[in-house]
Amino acid sequence: MRAHYTRIIMGMEIQLTPRQTPGSSVSQTAAGWHLEMPAGPPRTYRLAQLDDYGGMPRNHFLHSPPWTLRLRVRISVANLPGTWGFGLWNDPFGFSLGFGGQAGRLPALPQTAWFMHASLPNWLSLRDDPKTIPANGFFAGTFCSPNLPSFLFMPGLLALPLSAIRPVSRLLRRLTGRIIRQDAAPINVNVTQWHEYSFVWLDKSCTFSVDGSEILSTPRSPRPPLGLVIWIDNQFAAWTPQGRLAYGTLENPAAWLEIGNLTVQS
């Protein structure tokens, strides 16, 4: 039976479920949680994660605006190969394709509000100019998409091999950028030291702060409901302005992510 971590936070019962690949671990600390993954070569997925939506259909996810997250975070490796972060999303991938998706859940357009670090070769911006929207590095950001039924994605999945043709892939990327609205701002702090991160999610805005200073306020607010996720892994995904589409896993050193003083309000 899978373990659960339950805490009463601001009068709310928060139940987080750990998920980890072999060799990774999730454990409680006096003030929060410790997520750790081992060193390893590429082509093997390594993940340590906490979330509150496992086994649920998306329309049963728990969180809607107004909603506020505040927590302290530090990580052991400043530019860790892969990704790590914390916040809200709709787990859009589905099919458990190696990126944390839930088995049996169809893919969906992304809805996110989170702090995220994505190392090279990740390229997560749908804009051609990475100075407009960070494509990698450490940033706070949102994705906001139309709520389309998942079955509408089946023709797109069948056409996925066409994305290997660069002109077709560039066209699909431009079209996707018109459908999926995105906003983000880079964060320049020493992530190996403790910092306080917070964001406020409202119907028509999201505001992100680091150590009490606002770094991003955007009207591009994701559509509810969303699930809470905290993770560290060795994956990458890239869709570059040149039309190159790639994803996979990276060689990484042993690393950990620590969370403390997590509070939520709704």
Image (tube, rainbow, N blue to C red):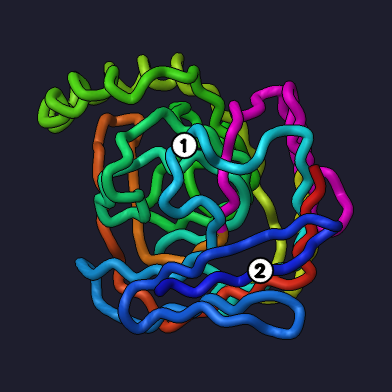
Cα gap from disc 1 to disc 2, whole angstroms: 21 Å
- In this rendering, would 2 be left or right of 65? left
The residue lying at 27 percent from left, 17 percent from top is: 171
Q: Quadrant of residue 224?
A: top right
142 vs 126, nearest the viewer: 142
Question: At label 2, which amino acid type do we have?
Answer: Thr
Q: Could you tell which of marks 1 and 2 lies nearer the N-terminus?
A: 2
Which quarter shows the N terminus? Answer: bottom left
Q: Position of residue 69 (x, y in %)?
A: 75, 51
Instruction: Report the residue at 77% width, 53% height from top.
Output: 264
Q: Position of residue 210 (x, y in %)?
A: 79, 54
Picture quadrant where residue 251 is located: bottom left
The answer to if 220 sits in the magenta stretch is yes
Report the magenta residues as a range. Answer: 200-229
Task: Name which residue type carries label 1.
Answer: Arg
Examine the image and state in which quarter residue 140 appears: top right
The reply to whether discs 1 and 2 touch (Cβ–Cβ < 8 Å) is no
Say which mark, if any, is on residue 156. none
Height in image: 81 above or below 143? below
* SS of the residue under disc 1: helix
Q: Which mark is residue 58?
A: 1
Can you identify the residue that label 2 sits on? 6
Q: Where is residue 33 in the image (x, y as percent from the top left)?
A: 63, 76
